[in-house]
Amino acid sequence: MGGPRFEPVRAVRAYERVVEQVEEAIESGSLTPGQRLPSERELMVQFSVSRSTVREALRVLQARGLVRSRPGDPNGAEVLPFTPAALHKSMTTLARVEELSLAELLQFRMVLDSSAILLATRQRSEEQLAEMDAAVARMREAVEAGHDTFGAADVAFHDAVARASGNKLIQICTDVVRSIVLGLISEKIATAPDRAALMRQSISHHEEVIAAVRAGDGRLAARLSRKAMYDYYAGYVPADERSALRALLE
Amino acid sequence: MGGPRFEPVRAVRAYERVVEQVEEAIESGSLTPGQRLPSERELMVQFSVSRSTVREALRVLQARGLVRSRPGDPNGAEVLPFTPAALHKSMTTLARVEELSLAELLQFRMVLDSSAILLATRQRSEEQLAEMDAAVARMREAVEAGHDTFGAADVAFHDAVARASGNKLIQICTDVVRSIVLGLISEKIATAPDRAALMRQSISHHEEVIAAVRAGDGRLAARLSRKAMYDYYAGYVPADERSALRALLE
DNA sequence: CTAGTGCACTGGTCGGACCAGTAGGCTACG
DNA sequence: CGTAGCCTACTGGTCCGACCAGTGCACTAG
């Protein structure tokens, strides 16, 4: 034994080297959002590769959400601020390929959302509390206005909570999973026969959650938020999968 | 108001159409992992686009982890089984670009891991319980063997728990975030002065968790698992950020 | 029957070409 | 002098044709 352990030399393709270098520049902050990359023809000189190679690299960077290019733009590709778009994309594929059930997605939301509430109770600012209040107020007004407005206000509430949690990862993941869930069932929600009743129930649930947050009882707020989500969504989950959600209620 | 609301016509590029079609075929299951795509030259006929366009599409699909191509392979690109690689990639970018702190990542792990334990308590099978036992046993043996073996056994434990939770999304997210955390501090762990003591403490924590799971006390198991993670990792978190983690302990 | 050799094909890269589009400078007109 | 409109020099998107190194398979020579 002993002797040098040779690593397998993976053939690294030219466009990958280009991707790596640009990626490194962006992640290290030497290229900041809003800045422009050189044009493709300029890049092919700097990297001394062909334009095809440059373009394949740019496609990869674009797929990762780091960069965007527009035809005709005299400036080169634009470095984008980070968005969870790529995260969203891969989670959506995950959901489709792995056939994630609605129950699993909601279970995940219940866990993350209630944890966000728990954390927010600890350290929410007054402004953030006011945001939550405002969102619920808008939900109240939107009972008549229809589901779009109501849904938007609901999203605003949960987003405010997620931000108040102080954890960006929780914030982004709740955001991504929420939009996947809504993508699955938003039309069912909009056409639910007991729509108005569900909205009113949801509003009072939200009010209870805010009260618990204001009172500083994080555990209660978390439990209430799980219950709120269960009551609002359970109707769209096949009956035999609901027990998995109820496991989080006690 | 009223009148038709025209949607902005986004110029959809040719390679995007190719991506969409192949993606749809994969996600709908009409192309299954292991199957081969036609060769690039064949694809350019089928889609009636140039090879450059085909290749850019393939780069995007590859970046999304759906496909892999090898030079010289007489078959075309291979359709891959889903892996969280793309998810991992975008979360890592997120962590770097948004400057996620170790505290945030650990907070996220504490939330997800303890929820997994809670769910696993409800519905673990005997085999899964045995897996956890076996993993802890290997951790016990590995105290002398060094950190690599110990870490691997630890990962096996948490993976068994995540699988027992019955929620694939939780399983994959814990996996991804765990590997990001380890990527940040694995060398610090390996060289920690009180390494052996930490390992022993961690083992007894894990034993307590398993006992709680076996006893069916999910709340206790969840709380213990948060405490276990806190005690094991808090030393690597800046002192002024630890309170965010302690918020999850009570 | 097997070992070895071609061959036909693959993906990776290159170079050049054309097109539609954009932005900004320039011109000509008011 | 100011401005409306054109012009041009660039951009990215797409196509074509070519070459290379590598792979797998069929065929051949032993």
Image (cartoon, coloured by chain):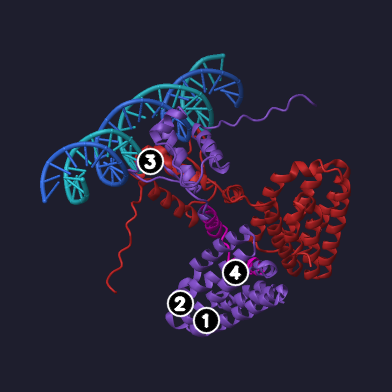
Chain colours: A purple, B red, C blue, D cyan
| Quadrant of the image containing the C terminus of chain A | bottom right
> Are discs 4 and 3 less than 8 Å apart at CB?
no
Give the amino acid type for the residue marked by disc 2 in the picture: His
Which residue in the structure is indicated by mark 1? A199
**A41 versus A206 height, above or below:** above
Query: Which contiguous range is marked in magenta?
Result: A86-114
Q: CA distance from mark 4 to mark 1?
A: 23 Å
Q: CA distance from mark 4 to mark 3?
A: 39 Å
Relative image position of residue B91 (x, y in whole percent) = 60, 51
Which residue in the structure is indicated by mark 3? A75
Relative image position of residue A229 (x, y in whole percent) = 60, 75
Residue B163 lies within the magenta run: no
Chain ID at mark 2: A
Res. B64 visible in picture: yes
Which residue in the structure is indicated by mark 2? A147
Q: Which mark is residue A128?
A: 4
For label 1, count other residues whose C-alpha is less than 10 Å away and answer few (under 14), some (14-19) or many (20+).
many
Please tell me which of labels 4 and 2 falls first in the chain. Answer: 4
